[in-house]
Image: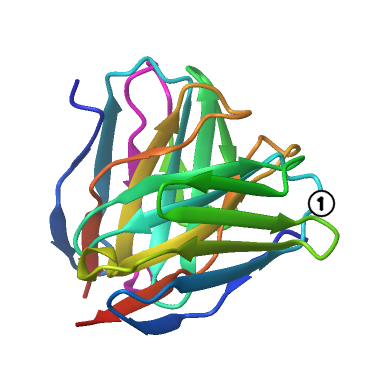
């Protein structure tokens, strides 16, 4: 079945790196995404990686994909208080209507 | 462009009442979907549509109906609201179903008493 799992909370100090981890079960996924949700708002795409890539870097963000272990991670360098939010891992399936399946979200707390 | 617009932002219903959550997008997106967000459970797909006149069920379709008479609009109907439907509802769209990222509305917070 389709399932995306991620830890619910992460707390870091301002200036440190944050690493949010995610595991998924469906090997047919084509794209894997990280979405960010700020309080009272909808989700916004932060970054994504195609399933045939291992790594993608975008300014302070680094996405690592281990397709063998079905493990995805998001690293935020030099974490700022403005990075406090809920981060959702998601996979876009290649079958069944191309649905996007979301994890439960990791709430990132950044301490000043 | 307005993007994805959801109305209302907040709604309180009594058990057994019906209502329609509205969703409209002005980006000519073919793919539209409804999710509900519950604490600790992430987003769960309710219904989705890959184009006008075509809808299909997601993970948690029971108690909800949808229709897609135009490309722009994708309303979600609760025929007889239950307390278990208390949640935050998000509408999302994308240009095509295969690759594009989802654009989300700002959500509707629904409470069923």
Q: Residues within 10 Å of mark 1 (few under 14, many from 20)?
A: some
The colouring scheme, among rainbow, by chain, secondary structure or one colour, is rainbow
- Residue A76: name its quadrant: bottom left
Left or right of A111 in this view: A51: right
Picture coordinates of residue A67, whole percent (x, y):
80, 55
- Residue B13: name its quadrant: bottom left
Viewer-proximal residue among B30 and A67: A67
Magenta span: helix, strand or loop, mainly?
Answer: loop
- The residue beneath circle 1 is A27
Which image quarter is the N terminus of chain B in? top left
Residue range in magenta is: B67-86
The residue sitting at 77% across, 55% down in the picture is A26
Q: Chain of mark 1?
A: A
Dot 1 falls on a residue whose secondary structure is loop
Picture coordinates of residue A94, whole percent (x, y):
74, 37
Q: Residue furthest right?
A: A68
A98 inside magenta stretch: no
Viewer-proximal residue among A51 and B103: A51
Left or right of B34 in this view: A21: right
- Residue A28: name its quadrant: top right
């Amino acid at each position: 079945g389709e399932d995306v799992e991620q830890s619910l909370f992460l707390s870091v100090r301002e200036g440190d790196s944050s690493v949010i981890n995610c595991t998924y079960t469906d090997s047919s996924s084509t794209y894997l995404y990280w979405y960010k949700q700020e309080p009272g708002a909808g989700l916004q795409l932060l970054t994504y990686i195609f399933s045939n890539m291992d790594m993608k870097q975008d300014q302070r963000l680094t996405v690592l994909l281990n397709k063998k272990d079905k493990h995805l991670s998001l690293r935020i360098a030099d974490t700022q208080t403005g990075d406090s939010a809920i981060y959702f891992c998601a996979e876009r399936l290649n079958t069944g209507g191309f649905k996007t399946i979301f994890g439960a979200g990791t709430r990132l707390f950044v301490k000043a | 462009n307005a993007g994805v617009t959801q109305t209302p932002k907040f709604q309180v219903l009594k058990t057994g009442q019906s209502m329609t959550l509205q969703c409209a997008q002005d980006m000519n997106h073919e793919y539209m979907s409804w999710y509900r967000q519950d604490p600790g459970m992430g987003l769960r797909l309710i219904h989705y549509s890959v184009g006008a006149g075509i809808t299909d069920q997601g993970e948690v379709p029971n108690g909800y109906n949808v229709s897609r008479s135009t490309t722009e609009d994708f309303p979600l109907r609760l025929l007889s609201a239950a307390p278990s439907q208390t949640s935050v509802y998000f509408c999302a769209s994308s240009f095509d179903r295969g690759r594009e990222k989802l654009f989300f509305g700002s959500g509707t917070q629904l409470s069923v008493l």
